[in-house]
């Protein structure tokens, strides 16, 4: 770096003399350029350092004022328990087949994600999953938006560590293109809320819905940090 | 009162809006080609088309079908000459026959969306239709044949 600057100083000195400037004027210009270059280097290095940090700078508009990494991470660990519960993970599988039941077994009937996440051919989700729960044991739970994430943005939960999942959700290009406001709204989505209206014979997620929303909001509002 | 269009015919039925569509089709309207199998959307015997999709009528409440277009096996074709019906006859697909109207209605959606399905497409579309007689191999063969018939018919038009 120093060698590079010295070389440029010599070059600039030479150019300044050639242009007919006085020695002092030339030196002033050179110093000014060096100062600007150093400032720019500091800015670039600082930015890249933050990129390597846990701050979720990728979510558009996610520039929280009152960030608190400890509180944020603590909240996410609560959120993570819910996201990894069958009620959430069954529709965020690692493969292209949904899961079902409290033991996350592969969905019967060879159900497939399909391009839009709504199944394929005669096996579309809404052919069995009605706009509301069907009464009785072993019947399909329902919601008007019943589906998996689409094939071009699978938003996989299954197999993700807490850190991986937090970073994925805070990444605008991996979270269904949601900015901070949309992420906060997502916890209020009727399909997310349906996780707590699971139908007969299924366990609810490990937190109450209100506790989940509170933890979700805290996690994001405090900076959207990912656990180490 | 709930308004339904079944096989292009309008009906007005006075039933509980939560009644399964299957009961309305069979017991109120009297179209008994669609069958009751499991009652919990697991077997596919009750498949009908609601606005073109292969819904399971045993768990579909009739209020969901309000104002919608329903097609049952009786309305799949005017003269029982849908390519699938021709193929089913040609290959003697059914054994006891109980699940076959559901099989045909599911296969009809597959052929509409994919006129040239491979075995994997057939599996993905049909795995939710159970046949206790085990006619699966003939069903697969018949769907391939129906696709061929459909292609020829469309080339002759």
Image (tube, coloured by chain):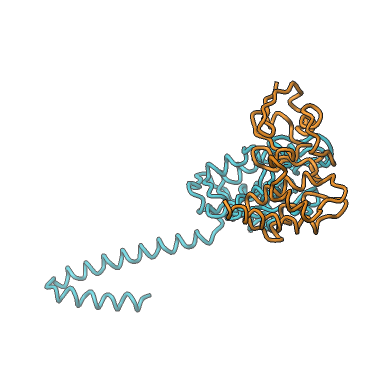
Chain colours: A cyan, B orange
Determine the image quadrant of residue B74.
top right
> How many numbered badges does the structure rendering display?
0
Left or right: B145, with B113 as reference point = right
Asked whether A23 or B148 is in front, the reply is B148
What quarter of the picture does the N terminus of chain A occupy? bottom left
User: Residue at 45% across / 60% down in the picture?
Assistant: A47
Give x and y (percent) for residue B14: 74, 21
Vertically, is A103 above or below B58? below
Where on the picture, by quarter, is residue A134? top right
Q: From the image, which quarter does the C terminus of chain A lie in?
A: bottom right
Q: Please, is residue A47 above or below residue A21 in the view?
A: above
> In percent of the image, x 79 and y 26: which residue is there?
B28
Relative to A20, A2 lies left or right = right
Q: Who's the residue at 44% across and 64% down the image?
A: A45
Is A108 drawn above or below residue B18 in the view shown? Answer: below
Q: Is residue A80 left or right of residue B33?
A: left
Q: Is residue A77 visible?
A: no
Residue A132 at x, y percent in the picture? 72, 34
Q: Is residue B5 above or below residue A103?
A: above
């Amino acid at each position: 770096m120093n060698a590079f600057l010295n070389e440029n100083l010599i070059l600039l000195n030479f150019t300044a003399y050639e242009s007919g400037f006085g020695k002092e004027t030339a030196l002033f210009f050179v110093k000014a350029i060096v100062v600007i270059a150093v400032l720019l280097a500091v800015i670039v290095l600082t930015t890249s350092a933050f990129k390597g940090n846990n701050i979720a700078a990728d979510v558009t508009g996610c520039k929280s004022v009152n960030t608190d990494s400890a509180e944020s991470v603590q909240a996410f660990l609560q959120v993570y328990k819910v996201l990894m519960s069958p009620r959430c993970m069954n529709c965020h599988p690692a493969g292209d087949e949904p899961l079902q039941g409290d033991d996350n077994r592969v969905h019967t009937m060879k159900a497939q994600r399909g391009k839009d996440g709504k199944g394929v051919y005669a096996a579309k989700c809404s052919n069995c999953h009605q706009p509301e729960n069907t009464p009785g044991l072993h019947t399909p739970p329902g919601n008007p938006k019943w589906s998996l994430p689409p094939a071009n943005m699978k938003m996989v939960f299954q197999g993700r560590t807490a850190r991986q999942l937090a970073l994925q959700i805070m990444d605008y290009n991996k979270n269904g293109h949601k900015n901070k406001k949309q992420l906060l709204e997502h916890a209020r989505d009727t399909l997310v809320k349906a996780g707590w209206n699971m139908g007969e014979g299924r366990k609810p997620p490990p937190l109450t819905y209100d506790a989940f929303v509170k933890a979700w909001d805290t996690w994001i509002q405090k900076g959207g940090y990912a656990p180490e | 009162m709930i308004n339904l269009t079944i096989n292009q015919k309008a009906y007005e039925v006075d039933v509980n809006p939560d009644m399964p569509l299957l009961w309305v089709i069979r017991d109120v309207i009297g179209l008994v080609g669609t069958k009751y199998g499991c009652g919990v959307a697991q077997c596919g015997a009750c498949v009908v088309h609601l606005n073109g999709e292969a819904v399971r009528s045993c768990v579909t409440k009739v209020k969901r079908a309000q104002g919608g277009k329903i097609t049952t096996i009786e309305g799949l074709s005017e003269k029982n000459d849908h390519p699938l019906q021709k193929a089913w006859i040609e290959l003697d697909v059914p054994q006891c026959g109980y699940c076959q109207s559901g099989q045909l209605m599911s296969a009809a959606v597959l052929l509409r969306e994919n006129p040239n399905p491979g075995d994997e497409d057939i599996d993905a579309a049909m795995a939710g239709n159970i046949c206790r007689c085990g006619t699966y191999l003939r069903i697969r063969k018949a769907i391939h044949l129906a696709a061929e018939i459909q292609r020829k018919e469309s080339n002759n038009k």
